[in-house]
Image (cartoon, grey):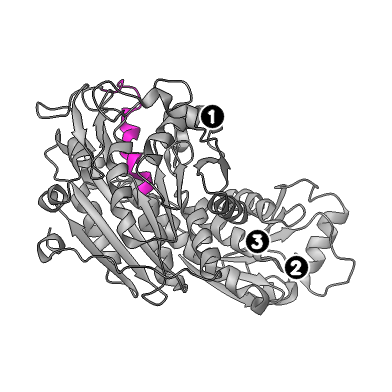
Amino acid sequence: MDFELKSLSPEQAAALAVDALLVLVPDALSTTPLAGALATLTSEAASKGDLETGLGKTLSCYRVPGIRASRVVLVRAGNGSGSAVRKAVTAGLASLKQPNIQQLGLVLSLLDDSNDAVSAAVQACADASYTYTTTKPSAKARALQEVVVAVADASAVQAAFDTGKAMVTGVEFAKEWANRPANHATPSMLADAARKLGRKPSIKTEVLGPKEVAALGMGAFMSVARGSVEPLRFIVMHYTGASKSSAPVVLVGKGITFDTGGISIKPAPEMDEMKYDMGGAASVLGTFAALAELQPAINVVGLIPSCENMPDGQAVKPGDVVTSMSGQTIEILNTDAEGRLILCDALTYAARFKPRSVVDIATLTGACVIALGAVRSGLFSAHDEIAAALQQAGESAMDPCWRMPLDDEYAEGLKSNFADMGNVAGRAGGSITAAKFLQKFTADLPWAHLDIAGTAWKSGAAKGSTGRPVPLLLQYLLDEAARPAPVAVAEPKKASKRARKA
């Protein structure tokens, strides 16, 4: 989908050679008289009550004299804020589902030029028209191909427009891979997708296979992969936008491409949705796709431990004890708490990059869904500065999170008689105890954890990936790029030639 930003008055927008115009109308229209058919239509429809007040209210028109597009939809945009614009665009596009509408004029010229509004409009337009087709030949591909975004002053919102486009790229990349069935998104296929991203400017990708992961001593990660015939993959990505001495941000994405629960097998209903258990990995890949477009001045490392969690005769059993890369031993009390097992070794690996911050992203616990639903991702961190930065980024990107507690008392249930820790601590506060488990592997790392179990996908009739939290992550990285970067103490180690061929 192509987006173009133009400085156009309503009169100029009326002359656009497009199939339809979607015109956002604020609650409080300007009293300054505007010339042209589009301005006249808007003011008369509002004054006579044909365009009702109320966010998302629409009025569809056909063949309006003086307007080149055959279809015009007016939609109320409330106060013109980012969240209001997103709802307005979604409502307006619901009236323009015709397959012959391939070119759209999205007219924001009646709103105050706002960075939030422009970025939100671009993202909402892409989201409302998104269609998954990879394994569904009968699905109708996205009809809408080109969108001209008309604003009063393009130069004032160019940066926000570019960011919005990059977020669309990242979100749709994440959606594509999370929506794919597990047999079309194996760990090896995920690694291939990362390799293709590695061909883009400033990005390099390395892939480690089972032998390299074993050599690193990642016993927790390997234990999860034992029950599957699909070989594990440990994906290491580097985006270099700043000097090599600049300490990177490390993003760690959970990449369980299918989760049966292992020997602690899940109930059958809705188990198909466990293909989304690599939503964290998909968000890291999507963020790198967005970085390739924007090229911000920051260094970023992406780590994706990826495997399946299956229940065959070689699968890890409840009660087994494994040794993590950190040397700490873990009693696996529940094989369905596997995401934390692959993440803990990746977090230990992350320390070698001497990062300015480490953020892991995972569809980790059903408990987080109960706590926060599908509105906000769960945020856990003992570092106030990182937590505040992530929360602010989420609010700015309209991809919000909510900080949860990390009191030491929550870790009491992780104690084990047979290992340094168990991998679960009972049902109470399950999202918090999962975060406390991960915290044991972060030592002095400036670390935060995002539990996206409630936000990474939608169930029901609208079943599918949301692409979250790509907007939050990208905004966080852009904010970090604007701050002075600490200097890395040591250069990261390179993977072996064998690893790069894995």
Do the residues bearing badges 1 and 2 touch, measured as CB atoms within 8 Å?
no
Q: Is residue 93 left or right of residue 356?
A: right
Q: Identify the disc placed on residue 371.
A: 1
Residue 1 at what x, y percent from top left? 45, 64
The amino acid type of the residue labelled 2 equals Leu
| Residue 434 within the magenta-colored segment of the rendering | no
Residue range of the region highlighted in magenta in the rendering: 265-280
| Residue 313, horizontal then vertical, whole percent | 9, 26
**Crowd rating for badge 1 (residues with CA inside 10 Å; few <14, some 14–19, many 20+):** some
- Which residue was labeled with disc 3? 116
Instruction: Classify 406 as above or below 114.
Output: above
Q: In this view, does 365 lie to the left or right of 25?
A: left
Q: Do the residues labelled 3 and 2 touch (CB within 8 Å)?
A: no
Q: How many C-alpha atoms fall within 10 Å of the one at disc 2: few (<14), some, or many (≥20)?
A: many
Element at badge 2?
A: helix
Q: Is mark 1 on a helix, strand or loop?
A: helix
Q: Where is residue 99 in the image (x, y as percent from the top left)?
A: 48, 55
| Mark 3 or mark 2, whichever is nearer to me | 3
Q: Can residue 68 be seen in this view?
A: no
In percent of width and height, residue 415 lies at: 35, 24
Count of numbered tags: 3
Above-or-below relation of 100 to 52: below
Quadrant in which residue 251 is drawn: bottom left
Question: The C terminus lies in which quarter of the figure?
Answer: bottom left
Between tags 3 and 1, which lies in front? 1
